Amino acid sequence: MFEYYTMLTPQDTYNSRGAPLNDVCGIVQQDRANVHKFGRRDAGDSVDPFFTTAERRAMIAGRCQFSKAHHTVARIRSAVVGFVLVRVFGNGSAVSRVEIYEAAG
């Protein structure tokens, strides 16, 4: 469907109520909420054309594929993981897979 670059930072590791997130998919979902809903973009965050609503951001949950050795909550929270490429697959109205890769930034 599309791809975008973003920074996964410590601010993305907490939900909108301040509770810590404990999975990478949740962090990616919160990153998109920070960009689209709250206007809290990190320097490396780009705007994607799809995750503009809570319903669409919810499609990220359970559909992430990433390096479990590299992309961990602890590494994102400690700012070891930062700039990533996110590729989103689906049929235009539904997400089937979200792939997360390291990116140079």
Image: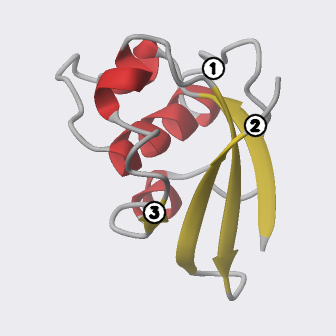
Q: Which residue is mark 2?
A: 103
| Label 2, residues with CA under 10 Å away: few <14, some 14-19, many ≥20 | some
Q: How many marks?
A: 3
Q: Position of residue 90 (x, y in %)?
A: 65, 83
The outermost residue toward the bottom is 91
Q: Which of 69 and 8 lies nearest the eye of the viewer?
A: 69
Q: Which residue is mark 3?
A: 64
Q: Which residue is mark 1?
A: 39
Q: Position of residue 62 (x, y in %)?
A: 33, 67
Vertical side of 88 occupied by 93: above or below: below
Quadrant (top left, top right, bottom left, bottom right) of the C terminus: top right
Q: Is residue 65 visible?
A: yes
Vertical side of 79 occupied by 63: above or below: below
Residue under the image location 54 percent in, 52 percent down = 53
Q: Secondary structure at mark 2?
A: loop
**Viewed as shown, does residue 78 lie left or right of 102?**
left
Q: Amino acid at mark 3?
A: Cys
Q: Position of residue 9 (x, y in %)?
A: 51, 18
